[in-house]
Each structure stands twice: as C-alpha cells, then as structure tokens.
C-alpha cells in the first residue's frame, strides 16, 4: 500500500500517526513539509481530497497566523493556500494519503481510518 505522510517530526500528532503506520508494517513516503513544502497545486489537491477548506487547514494558534491577519475574511482560498506554501508552518499536520483517502490526522489515531480492515 502506498502511503504518504506530510510530517513534522516536532509534532506529537505527526509522530503518533507515523508510529501507528510503522506498527502496522507500513513504511510511508515521508514528506517533511517544512523543508519541502507542497506546491500550491499539490496543496489545493490535498485540501480537495480531504473535503475541507484552506482555512480549515490553517494553524490558527501559530503566531504567524495572527501576525499576517489570516483570521480576516478578506483572504481568498487561493491566497490562504499561497500563505501556507510560503509559510508551511501555517499548515496543520499530519496529512496522510492512502489508497483509502486523504485526511488531516489530528489526533494521530485518525490515521487508522485510512487503512484497510486488514491493517487497521
């Protein structure tokens, strides 16, 4: 099974999701998005696959969120995506993609919903 995790090693939810995958014998492709952020197109695709809005992927507790005034309704979806590409620290994590779907896995245990019955 091909699995990709958009991972931040400093995040407990991200570490938890990765550990749960590995406990089930799955070695995912790890994208450390702070080092290699997704493109705007990739990020828009992930957001669409998760069925959420760009605003729902933002880390509102991140100080940069307030500094940039991202709580203002003036920001378009494309502008919010651009901000996350320029400042990937604004992205919530981890995002996990499997053949069974794509999801923001907060808490990390939500990754189990993306595995087939045999591996969950």
Image (cartoon, grey):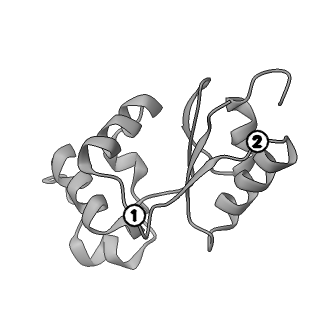
With 85 as the anchor, is 78 left or right in this view? left
Q: Residue at x 17, y 46 (%)?
A: 78
Mark 1 closeness class: few <14, some 14–19, many ≥20 residues within 10 Å: few
Where on the picture, by quarter, is residue 42? top left
Q: Residue furthest left?
A: 74
Vertical relation: 108 (above or below) 14: above
Pinpoint residue 103: horizontal percent, then vertical percent: 55, 38
Q: Which residue is mark 2?
A: 26
Where on the picture, by quarter, is residue 93? bottom right
Pinpoint residue 35: horizontal percent, then vertical percent: 42, 70
Pinpoint residue 61: horizontal percent, then vertical percent: 46, 70
Mark 2 closeness class: few <14, some 14–19, many ≥20 residues within 10 Å: some
Q: Quadrant of the N terminus?
A: top right
Q: Nearer the viewer, residue 96 or 55?
A: 96
Q: Which residue is mark 1?
A: 36
Q: Residue at x 65, y 46 (%)?
A: 28
Vertical relation: 54 (above or below) 64: above
Q: Nearer the viewer, residue 69 or 54?
A: 54
Vertical relation: 120 (above or below) 32: above
Which comes sooner in the sequence, label 2 or label 1? 2
With 120 as the anchor, is 7 left or right in this view? left
């Amino acid at each position: 099974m091909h699995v990709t995790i958009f991972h931040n090693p400093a995040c407990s939810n991200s570490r938890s999701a990765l550990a749960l995958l590995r406990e089930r014998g799955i070695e995912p492709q790890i994208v450390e998005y702070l080092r290699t952020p997704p493109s705007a197109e990739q990020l828009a695709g992930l957001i669409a696959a998760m069925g959420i809005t760009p605003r729902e992927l933002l880390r509102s507790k991140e100080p940069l969120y307030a500094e940039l005034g991202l709580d203002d309704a003036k920001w378009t979806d494309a502008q919010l995506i651009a901000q996350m590409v320029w400042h990937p620290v604004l992205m919530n994590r981890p995002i996990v993609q499997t053949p069974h779907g794509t999801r923001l896995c907060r808490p990390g245990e939500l990754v189990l919903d993306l595995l087939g019955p045999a591996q969950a």
